[in-house]
Image (tube, coloured by chain):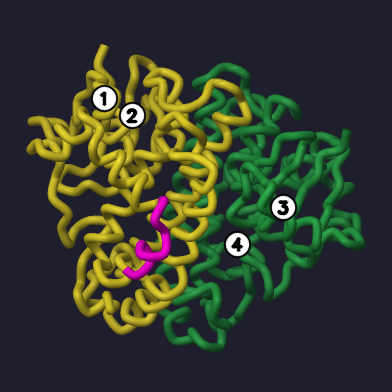
Chain colours: A green, B yellow
């Protein structure tokens, strides 16, 4: 039976980390909220009184009777089914730890344009975004990418010689940062050649390449978690 | 062999979620950075070239050869060893999902006083903190606590009739929010009686009570993730 992925239609967002795992594995899945009637089904699973494990927010995944939210937890669930992580406990946890660190960067990338509240418009928090984005691009982007560079030093992939979902997610992080902060990210990537090499290796995987070239891959835009506002890049 | 917990000495912070799990279980552990020479050992594990799985940041846990970082991942690792989560996959993931949602609130609580950068002082970002804290206390605190209230509706504990580490963490979240935003949190808790009841139940657990009354429990302070600045509460 197909996996059912629930996420906001129209953006890559956090859902994209799950999509990449499903697409790279050739898994059968439905991107429910992009189908007719899908948004109502998504809201019902979040709000319905009969739902035993209601997710706080999208993305979430339904696999038969199992409903799981939080991007990193979804990937933890999918990994053994899609062969995207080691099967030993320490290896599995390490990949999860990498994913949680990527999630931290993603949250910071979001807050670089929404430092006051996600519920307000960017236009309502531009001076604050200007300050926060400067810290993010001058300090946080290099700090995080340098850490991933160090992790990659002994291996091609983050957790060894086999690709895991954390590698797909690091690819997506580089994509998102490059879209949102092209100048700052290029500067940081000039210092992290292993991160660049990993990104390029992932981009050439046949199933992923086919996905990226398809209409299923939504374009980045300024409703997304990663947003390009030229005034925030420098 | 004792678990070795590594976290900044002097604050509860994210390390406290791990401490509560260890303390409530009566587990044997060393809070390494609070011992003589412990800080150097902590830094070495983060920076040493020989470390295969270097944590990005504290807290992290060492258990023999296993080194695991990220608060939620540490608790995922400890849960089966301390009997603090269901053993079936769906139950285990649900508790982890709850923990990741608590981690999201904790990150937002931190950013309420540091909306621009963790590397700057609070005094360098007071106007921005004033705005973000208002959104946090008026919108986010009630939104999150109402969600936990709903999850608690059919049970005493978050994941059923047995306590899990997510319950200990929700206790700590209520403690932290009450310290940092006493007025706003009291207003939200007046609408979430099940959250209050869970907090009070956890506080009466004998081993946890003994810990809270001991010198091992550090007081909250304004170097911590949860900070009380009266001007940010209203």
Question: Residue B203 shows which numbered tag?
Answer: none
**Left or right of residue A136, residue A180 in this image:** right
Label 1 Cα crowd, 10 Å radius (few <14 / some 14-19 / many 20+):
some
Q: Is residue B102 left or right of residue A233?
A: left
Lateral position of residue B36 relative to residue B101, left or right: left
Q: Same chain for labels 2 and 4? Say yes or no.
A: no
Of the pair B232 and A156, the residue shown nearer to us: B232
Q: Are marks 4 and 3 in contact (CB under 8 Å)?
A: no
The residue depicted at 11 percent of the width and 39 percent of the height is B213
Marks 1/4 same chain = no
Residue visible at 34% across and 52% down in the picture: B196
Secondary structure mostly taken by the magenta-highlighted segment of the chain: helix
- Disc sitting over residue A45 in the figure: 3
Q: Position of residue A150 (x, y in %)?
A: 46, 39
Foreground residue, A9 or A147?
A9
Q: Looking at the picture, how far across and down is residue B161, in whole percent?
A: 47, 31
B190 or A146, nearer to the observer: B190
Q: Earlier in the sequence, mark 4 or mark 3?
A: 3
C-alpha span from label 1 to label 3:
40 Å
State whether residue A165 is above or below residue B134: above
Q: Please tell me the numbered disc located at residue B4.
A: 1
Tag 4, which chain?
Answer: A
């Amino acid at each position: 039976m197909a996996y059912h992925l629930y996420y906001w239609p129209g953006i890559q967002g956090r859902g994209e980390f799950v999509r990449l795992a499903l697409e790279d594995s050739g898994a059968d899945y439905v991107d429910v909220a992009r189908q007719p009637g899908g948004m109502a089904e998504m809201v019902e699973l979040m709000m319905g009184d009969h739902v035993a494990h209601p997710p706080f927010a999208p993305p979430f995944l339904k696999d038969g009777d199992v409903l799981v939210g939080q991007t990193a937890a979804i990937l933890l669930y999918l990994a053994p089914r899609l062969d995207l992580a080691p099967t030993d406990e320490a290896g599995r946890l390490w990949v999860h730890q990498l994913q949680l660190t990527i999630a931290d960067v993603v949250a910071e990338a979001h807050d670089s344009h929404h430092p006051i509240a996600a519920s307000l418009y960017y236009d309502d928090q531009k001076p604050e975004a200007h300050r926060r984005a400067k810290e993010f691009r001058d300090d946080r982007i290099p700090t995080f990418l340098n850490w991933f560079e160090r992790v990659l030093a002994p291996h091609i992939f983050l957790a060894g010689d086999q690709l895991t979902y954390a590698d797909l997610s690091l690819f997506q992080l580089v994509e998102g940062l490059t879209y949102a902060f092209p100048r700052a990210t290029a500067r940081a990537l000039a210092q992290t050649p292993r991160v660049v090499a990993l990104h390029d290796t992932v981009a050439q995987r046949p199933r992923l390449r086919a996905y990226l070239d398809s209409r299923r891959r939504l374009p980045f835009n300024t409703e997304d978690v990663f947003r390009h506002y030229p005034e925030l890049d420098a």
